[in-house]
Image: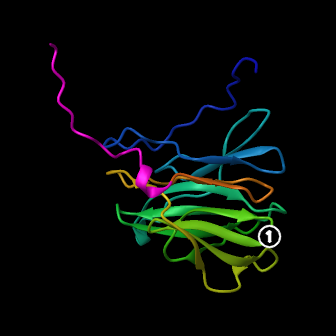
Amino acid sequence: GGTAQILASITAGMNTTSGTGTTQGSWATDDSIVFGTGRNGIQRVSAAGGNPQQLTTLNLKDGEDFHTSPEILPGGKALIYGANIGTTQRRLMIRTLSSGDTRVLEAEGMMPHYVSSGHLVFGRSGSLFAAPFDLQRLQLTAPPVSVLDGVATDVNRAGSSVVHAAIAGNGSLAFLPSDDVVNTRTLVWVDRQ
């Protein structure tokens, strides 16, 4: 409870098609919050407030137009996030915070999340995938495998993407089955009589 506190003023990379700008964020163990600003990359701000620090910028040469779903990995050495290329391609990225080195972690996927079992979990084509991840070398150590099919995903016309799933620290998973996607519509006839 309590009164909402403004932590920082930001300029989100507003998308005039959808009206969206900021994307998902996460709380890091160093008591900072990382969040996507859409077309203005990913930023970090102290939980106590202050000026945001720019962590990523779009790689326009590679066609990136949106950064989303950031998460600082345990140990605080690196950031994982999603990069959208146009309205159809999603890839997983990793950025080493000390050097700024950025690379593609997985060519197809969205909304990455590291879990305590040592795996990276992410969405792809209506499924959740998992792959073992080495926190020291900051790389996948085996190819991803599908662990759950039928997970609702949304991609809006502006290209922003959401996997309707969340994993708790204890490994519990909550998800919205793809049959229950919120965008499902039913046409009904309503008569005032």
At 60% from the left edge and 61% from the top edge, which residue is drawn?
A: 81
| 22 horizontally vs 52: left or right | left
Q: Is residue 192 magenta?
A: yes
Scheme of image coloration: rainbow
Left or right, 109 with respect to 86, comes to right
Is residue 41 a member of the stretch shown in magenta? no
> Considering the image in quadrants, where does the C terminus appear?
top left
User: Residue at left 67%, top 41%?
Assistant: 52
> In the picture, residue 85 is in which quadrant?
bottom left
Q: Quadrant of the N terminus?
A: top right
Provide the secondary structure element on which disc 1 rests. Answer: loop
Q: Residue at x 46, y 42 (%)?
A: 21
Residue located 76% across and 18% down the image: 2
Residue identified by numbered label 1: 117
Instruction: Please provide percent x and percent y for residue 136.
Output: 82, 77
79 vs 40: above or below? below
Amino acid under disc 1 = Ser
* Span of residues in magenta: 177-193
Residue 142 visible to the viewer: yes
Q: Position of residue 27 (x, y in %)?
A: 74, 46
